[in-house]
Image (cartoon, rainbow, N blue to C red):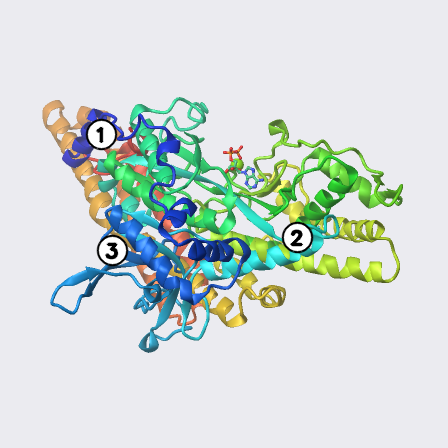
Amino acid sequence: MSKLRFEVITAAFGKKAIEVPECDKRPSDYFGAKVFNREKMFKYLSKEVYSKLIDVIDNDAPLDSSIADSVAEGMKRWAVENGATHYTHWFHPLTETTAEKHDAFIEHDGKGGIIEEFSGKLLVQQEPDASSFPNGGIRSTFEARGYSAWDPTSPAFLMDDTLCVPTVFISYTGEALDYKAPLLKSLRAVDKAATDVCRYFDKNVRKVTTYLGWEQEYFLVDEGMMLARPDLLLTGRTLMGHDSAKNQQLEDHYFGSIPKRVAAFMKELEIEAMKLGIPAKTCHNEAAPNQFELAPIYEECNLAVDHNMLIMAIMKEVARRHGFRVLLHEKPFKGVNGSGKHNNWSLGTDTGVLLMAPGKNDKDNLRFITFVVNTLAAIYRHNGLLKASIMSAANAHRLGAAEAPPAIISSFLGSHLSSVLDHMETTDDVVKILSKRELRLNIPSIPELMIDNTDRNRTSPFAFTGNRFEFRAVGSEANCASAMIALNTAMAEQLTIFKREVDMLVDSGIAKEDALVKVIRKYIKYSKPIRFDGNGYSEEWCREAMRRGLDCEASAPIVFDRYLDKESVAMFRNMEVMTETELRARNEIKWEMYTKKIQIEARVLGDLALNHIIPTATKYQSSLLDNVIKMEQVIGKEEGDRLSAENIELVKQMAEHVSEIRRLVTELVERRKIANRISNERDKAIAYHDTVAPMLESIRYHIDHLELVVDNELWTLPKYRELLFIV
Ligand code: ADP
Ligand code: MG
């Protein structure tokens, strides 16, 4: 074994779980300790300022700029008392991470000294020098000014010595340069449209909130081993590595007992999450070795998105303290499951009703069916767009790899709900109005609780799970907002159309319930092609989906086109979520990002092939040949050659692989050069997808063969059996 590899492996074996601070306290003792939450607002703000701020948070009241100074002052006082020295506007640029620019809380005091200061002006708006964030050409770099603006609906929090203020990030011409701005707009759109529809059932409803409960999957790798794998370090995934003889065949990792070192990491992560107000609830092993999951209790969507971004950041920090590195990439290892992020999505009213949950009586159930059917219609109309919202260079490895949903959006409802919809579609007298107050639905009864784990279809990308839909195709590294923006906007549009049609029927004299059922039936029929309860991994489904006219495109750069379809542009514009300019700019970024990701992978693989793999293989060839010569010398030519025949054969095979690797790497460089000459971002991304990406696999094929036969003593890179099994 190469010296480095030997050292990192023995070091990993010796590592013990570290003690976790505050392990003995109860979560309620420290939950939210690092958040400027309502309790602290109440303590640090005057009564008047507090109630004005709560009105902004709860009721979308416009922000009264006169309170900004007081809020900033209160926030700063709390932060400084808790050790903060700096503040930052924290935002989600169009990369997959968050951004922050730290400034100290200091101002000249006019007497040669300094004082700690944080004004309302600094809280509300800032101008980060943002020229280096992706903007898809909206802002050319010479006028690189964007501004970040406070989002009071997501509370400020402390990270180390810094007060972080969640913000949106917008260009001076008003276009969003981040995920949060369109997310907030999509939440507003769905609130308005859903509230209008809710009022058919309950006049008291004034607000509908979108909920998101994410489940975050990730891998842990020993830090030393990660550092000895340049591909993992630079691209987040292994670009080579032969299957381990044992991986997940025995299904012994899923829900298995958690190794002590990992358990200590999870405990600390949970504590850190709780301090930041993230209600972390479940931690468990996932299907692949060294794969784990964390899920909090669901929250309001904007807050949940911020919390997911935060968790991804603190995971990385906590992991380092435990001698691990976190892999958030969707497919770090070939041959074992990749990682996703399930987005459990639902809507709820300010009267306490979950709209995707069955109710106690027929009226409630008509409301329930209304929302389920409108969801189906929304995702059917925009199935291609929804796929685009979760597509990336990394997630493309997972979709369609018979471990995650295919690159086709469909929805699983379960047999019970399916039969209810089928019945409604085919039966004429669904509604009987018995009296003004009483209504009888002529449909199979709907149990109040539909959550039934046996009835779950894990192959479905968008499954109904009792009181919510679970969007399972989201990538583990992605910002949840991308999927949520598309889903919320599609839902808002569909509910708006639905309401218009129901109102038209009511205006023509049809009773409200009959009108509702008529329009529901129309959308049950309309959305039928999106319903699929069978095996989403099967080949028959791909053929069937094609017949049904669902979007089956799998090439990521082409999937991104769906954002610019006439229907998508109209939807985002009509729901006032994004303009065509914004959509175009975002697509430029998607294509550019796609190209860059593949480009980096290609460079890393080329380097490693030439300076790790080939030298190692040739060294081993030499030692085999040396043996052949010595055999001849000692035993005599004839007998020696006979006994060395297999070694000679092996040397030849290795020489073939080595020469193929050289040839392919040269070709890879050539293809990259050709692709790089293309100036149109879309065409360049397509060239990278079609001509560069497939070569990574071809090169890997030869490297993985060499790994199998080359002396283990010589191999420099940690192998799958080490990366996946040593924690
Ligand atoms: P599973 O792995 O079986 O899907 P988990 O318990 O790991 O289940 O995760 C379920 C997730 O769904 C949690 O984040 C939970 O808070 C969330 N969730 C539960 N009910 C709702 C709901 N009505 N709306 C949104 N999210 C929900
Ligand atoms: Mg789930």
**Residue drawn at the location 21% of the way across and 44% of the way down:** 612
Spatial CA distance of label 1 from label 3 is 37 Å
Residue 566, image x, y percentages: 62, 68
Tell me the element at label 1: helix
Residue 623 appearing in the image = yes
Mark 3 or mark 2, whichever is nearer to me: 3
**Residue at mark 3:** 86
Query: Where is the C terminus found, in terms of image quarters?
Result: top left
- Specify the quadrant of the image occupied by residue 139: bottom left
Closer to us: 451 or 720: 451
> In the displayed image of the protein, which residue is found farthest to the bottom?
142
Mark 1 or mark 3, whichever is nearer to me: 3
Query: Where is the N terminus found, in terms of image quarters?
Result: top left
Tell me the element at label 2: helix
Closer to us: 368 or 28: 28
- Specify the quadrant of the image occupied by residue 462: top right
Closer to us: 256 or 360: 360
Residue 380's disc is: 2
Instruction: Specify the amino acid type for callout 2.
Output: Tyr
Instruction: Please report whichever mark, 3 or 2, sits nearer to the chain's N-terminal start.
Output: 3
- Specify the quadrant of the image occupied by residue 243: top left
Q: Residues within 10 Å of mark 2 (few under 14, many from 20)?
A: many
Residue 12's disc is: 1
**Residue drawn at the location 62% of the way across and 38% of the way down:** 467
Instruction: Specify the amino acid type for callout 1.
Output: Ala
Q: Residues within 10 Å of mark 1 (few under 14, many from 20)?
A: some
Closer to us: 424 or 645: 424
Asked if the residue at tag 1 contacts the one at tag 2, i.e. Cβ–Cβ closer than 8 Å, the answer is no
Instruction: Please report whichever mark, 2 or 1, sits nearer to the chain's N-terminal start.
Output: 1
Residue 143, image x, y percentages: 34, 77
**Residue drawn at the location 43% of the way across and 57% of the way down:** 49
